[in-house]
Image: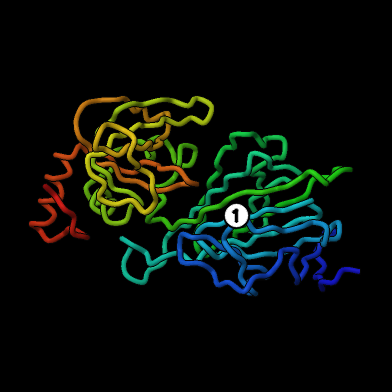
Amino acid sequence: MSPHPKLRLPGGWCISLGSPCPSHPALCPPWGSGGLYPGGGGTPLTGAAVPCSGLSQEAGSVEQLTLRCAEGSLEWLYPTGALRLRLAPRLPPATGTGKGRSPRHVTACIKPAGTFRGAQLYLERDGELELLLPEAEAAPRPRVRCFSWLPREKVALFLQATPHRDISRRIAAFRYELRGDWLARLALPAASLPAEGACRPCNDTELLMAICTSDFVVRGSIRSVSNDAELQESIIGVSAIRIHRQKFPLFQAGGRPGRAAGSIRTPLRCGVRPGPGTFLFTGWLHFGEAWLSCAPRYKDFQRIYEGARRRRQNPCEFPVD
């Protein structure tokens, strides 16, 4: 007999009111650091790789959890039955959309582990299931999958175990990121936006907002561009003249003498090529990698920023020299 009370659902599935994941007393970390809450509002779990085990589940049962933090990860050991993960992120204040306003859209990205086995991942939207990740598609270099929804929509991830005689070596693990619409245009990777959205230059408003809110703002030059056909990404090697901001150590010493170096990713279809000149690179950390949002020539940025400052329309102060 299962130690958790269950609610019976049509089709033979049931939802457990308990959880196969261990509880921890830690609070949900600040936005951007990860976390997971079980049971739709019970004790929060840490934002590191959270272990769950199918050994405590009955076949045909559905354990229900709620993802409330902006980033996190899940590791399901020995998958049995199913997990339903309700997406209810506590997103930061709506930068650029008006004080106190909620985002018009919420966007989620999922990156499965290269060893993802034993389950298939579905997107549940308004009661309909859409297959996001078949077990057969797991690969050593997994592809990120992203999707968006309106705040009023009911959205969940449905992780269903696939039948196997031997479950001992099967682990279904993935990382996730949740963002509001004020970040989605600037932060999503190659497969997440149409070409006109992913590759068009930032307009003046987007650029001025990017220097205030991005994970990194770096002035520098392009030293190389390499292409990854398998992941459909271009990797831009950057030699940094000045690091205005980086929330994570993306650019470190190791390039030209006296300069830091790092790499920034962008969709392959954007056709980035190496060229002379100084640029202002802005962007976001996406699953541990730097992704480009805006990259104007520095002289163009100076003109745009000075014009906005004269009109008192700059959203933040930025050192220009």
Instruction: Judge left or right: residue 180 versus residue 8.
Output: left
Q: Whole-percent x and y of residue 152?
A: 52, 65
Q: In the picture shown, does residue 58 fall above or below 214?
A: below
- Residue 51: in sight, yes or no? yes
Circle 1 sits on which residue?
Answer: 73
Q: Nearer the viewer, residue 150 or 38?
A: 38
Residue drawn at point x = 46 percent, y = 56 percent: 179
- Residue 65 in the image: x percent, y percent? 67, 64
The percent coordinates of residue 301 (x first, y second) are: 17, 44
Element marked by disc 1: strand
The N terminus is located in which quarter? bottom right
The three-letter code of the residue at mark 1 reads Ser
Residue 73, quarter of picture: bottom right
- Residue at position x 36%, y 32% in the image: 236
Q: Is residue 185 visible?
A: no
Q: Is residue 166 above or below residue 124?
A: above
Q: Is residue 119 above or below residue 234?
A: below
